[in-house]
Image (cartoon, rainbow, N blue to C red):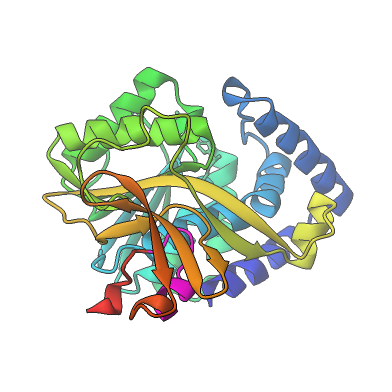
Amino acid sequence: MSGEALRGALEQSLAGFDQRAIAAAVRRLGAGYRSGEAGAPRLDDPRSVAAYAAYRMPATYAAVRAVLAQLPELDPAILLDVGGGTGAAAWAAIDICPGLRSVTVTDRSTAALEFGRRLATQAPHEALRLARWERSDASAPIPAADLLTASYVLGELDPHARQGLIETMARSGATVVVVEPGTPEGYRRVLAAREQLLVHGHRVLAPCPHSAACPLADTTDWCHFAVRLDRSALHRRVKSAELGYEDEKFAYVATAPGGQAAAVGRVLRHPQTRKGLVRLTVCQRDEQVAPIAVRRSAASYRAARDARWGDPWPPRDAG
Ligand SMILES: C[S@@+](CC[C@H](N)C(=O)[O-])C[C@H]1O[C@@H](n2cnc3c(N)ncnc32)[C@H](O)[C@@H]1O
């Protein structure tokens, strides 16, 4: 529902901008992001921010929403989104956690915060409309919260700042959600954050079914997931894209002090379905990633046919 709300709000907020200038800024931004880690473009001026909101925000929103949807026990009252930019994670959180009554978004970019603040005035949720948008560096102390999000931020920080931010988040006592692009580098950053959070007494809620070492850590594979999102007409226009959808790949970890894994196993790839047989690749509690073949005769066959990459396995309602 809020995906629609965000799309509508973006259409309206971006209507006042010269669309050609936004499309040009999107091309510059896209080139900046593709050029690599150190080249992350700065969201310093209103046009770059508008381009970010049109080009990336629907995807980062969808990724964070998909992550939070994997945390069925999550019911925070206070959200702090660090490096929140235009507020994608706040829009996602308010969507999944209707009990939120206080939302704060911090970022170093005044232009991003100002865009986010104006965008949020169109939100259907009061807590988001009343959100605080605070200019702050990721290295600053953070106010108390139940849920801390850092989405697509770690890659913009140097290793020292990254560690500092995770340490601050780990010590806060809150549930911590870190989301990064679903690239090998994004996964490595998530893995390092995971290790650091565990050292501080956190336990993994998702995606891992355990808090032991990641079985993919010493392989050439990397743990990541994908979410498909519809592209609005605006989204297609600014990206000069034909397809009506895109797949956003992301890596993530959600942890809490003394938390418990939300799943017994996690589907790590698109399931392979052939006549009467579903093959799942599942990360399991015994710290192994193992193939599971579910035949038509099995009681879990229907659930296996419905299983998607990133889902818990067995499904939560399997009893
Ligand atoms: C790729 S954007 C992600 C924005 C938002 N979290 C999202 O998921 O759409 C990265 C954000 O991190 C912010 N950022 C980068 N370095 C920062 C720092 N040292 N302190 C605070 N914010 C920072 C940028 O201004 C930008 O808004």
Above-or-below relation of 109 to 234: above
Which residue is found at the position 71% from the left and 67% from the top? 12
Q: Position of residue 73 (x, y in %)?
A: 23, 67
Which residue is found at the position 24% from the left and 60% from the top? 264
Quarter residue 3 falls in: bottom right
Would residue 34 be found to the left or right of residue 75 on screen? right
Q: Quadrant of the C terminus?
A: bottom left
Above-or-below relation of 273 to 236: below
Above-or-below relation of 239 to 66: above
Q: Position of residue 5 (x, y in %)?
A: 58, 73
Which residue is found at the position 34% from the left and 69% from the top? 97
Quarter residue 197 falls in: top left
Which residue is found at the position 51% from the left and 61% from the top? 271
Residue 51 visible? The answer is yes
Instruction: Find out whether residue 303 is within the magenta segment.
Output: yes
Would residue 296 be found to the left or right of residue 13 on screen? left
Residue 15 visible? The answer is no
Labels in figure, total: 0
Quarter residue 246 falls in: bottom right
Give whichever of 89, 229 is nearer the camera: 229
Instruction: Find out whether residue 292 is within the magenta segment.
Output: no
Q: Which residues are magenta?
A: 302-311
Q: Position of residue 199 (x, y in %)?
A: 16, 32
Q: Position of residue 201 (x, y in %)?
A: 12, 39
